Amino acid sequence: MVLTREENDLLTRVGPGTPGGELLRRYWMPVAVAAELTPEQPTRLVRLLGEILVLFRDRTGRVGLLSDRCAHRSASLVYGRVEERGISCAYHGWLYDTRGCILETPPERNDAIINSVKQPAYPVRKYVGMYWAYLGPEPAPELPPYDTLVRRDGRRRLVIHPVLDCNWYQAMENSVDPAHLQILHQEYIGRGRQPVNTTRGFTDDVADTDFYVTSIGIMKKRTYKTGQVDEHPLVFPNILRQGYSTQIRVPLDDTHTAHIHVMFEPTPDGSLADEAEDPPVEYLAPYKDPPDAVHPDAVYNLRSVLAQDHMAWETQGPIADRTLEHLSYSDRGIHLFRKVTREQIDRVQRGLDPMGVIRDPNHPMLDTNIDESTKVESGGGRPVGVGAPTPAD
Ligand code: FES
Ligand SMILES: [Fe+2]
């Protein structure tokens, strides 16, 4: 069933006031690695859901996220100077605190403006070595207690992939597209075997694929002819959980998506790991040349599973035109994800929380199948993977 242009927009647009953007505004999103804010560089430009914001830490340690456009005459606050009370616009010195209150309006003091104007400000929390922001209506929900983010019996690290120069929904549709693993990634999953031919890749390893909706998303189930079962979830709306990785796709705007992997490796004996420090961070090199170009001007290097994925997602277009596609039986996970997305948009429009929004501060940890998927990842007879934690899907 081909989508209309209106349906394509519904699923892909992320800006304020769009149905999809309002859905995404019900979730906390990571916006920066915590170590990226330093005393020397206490401000940082943040793009999130089509908004341009400034993240800053004042000299007392409070972190704020404000609209980047100064309320006075629109200069960027990224170039502002931080002090104890907040951030002061570089142009004329208007001073804002982390809640967006205007404290000063140099050179004069204009109480009418101070009392009536507020800079758009969003809550920020530090979690798993990153700052997370919530752009939706108050009150903000709880940060998501996914096992890979909160379990203490293991080590975490962050891997920052290059920004995807395409819409977030392409990356998420890929997360319910198990058939592509045996084709697109055939060079990386054979463990020395040769595929029967390049067209089928390792497709014939797979007996069956299935999908089912859970309380937090969509479980993708792949059964191999060996009897091995590989189940890992799309955590609604923007996370793929696979192996050791929690792959968070953060919509920056309609055509750019941050791609952050939280890697969690449980200790073999269940012992607790010391979490005094933020997880180490690795920034990956671009998957294409030139790094800022898009298809057909960029050439993708395909040197890893994720490089192949980025190629596939970006070459679908900045926003894939789904009026042109021809879905087949193997695309039924994509059909299901679109259906779930529409249902969750509908919930938001009826004033309800969508799937996976947590309000209870004592909510138990959410199981994302980490033990099952790491068992598969670390061998277990799966005809896939290259030993250690190479993200595959
Ligand atoms: S534009 Fe920011 S203080 Fe004037
Ligand atoms: Fe993939």
Image (tube, helix red, strand yellow):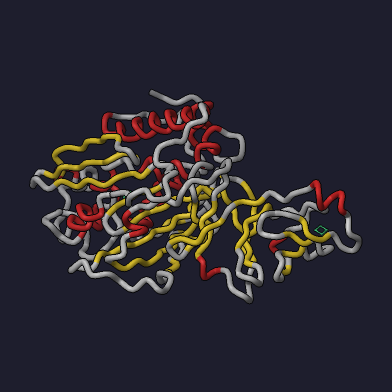
Residue 106 figure quarter: bottom right
- Quadrant of image for the N terminus: top left
> Does residue 79 show up?
no
Image coords of residue 197 (percent x, y): 19, 47
Image coords of residue 164 (percent x, y): 48, 52
Image coords of residue 365 (percent x, y): 32, 52
View extreme (bottom): residue: 40
Is 38 rendered above or below residue 103? below
Left or right, 351 with respect to 326, comes to right
Left or right, 372 with respect to 27, comes to left
Q: Residue at x 24, y 52 (%)?
A: 186
Residue 15 figure quarter: top right
Q: Residue at x 70, y 54 (%)?
A: 100
Number of labels in the image equals 0
Image coords of residue 43 (percent x, y): 64, 66
Residue 209 figure quarter: top left
View extreme (right): residue: 108
Q: Residue at x 45, y 65 (%)?
A: 129
Is 184 rendered above or below residue 332? below
Q: Residue at x 52, y 35 (%)?
A: 20
> Does residue 362 show up?
yes
| Viewer-side residue, 86 vs 76 | 86
Is 12 rendered above or below residue 289? above
| Viewer-side residue, 130 vs 194 | 130
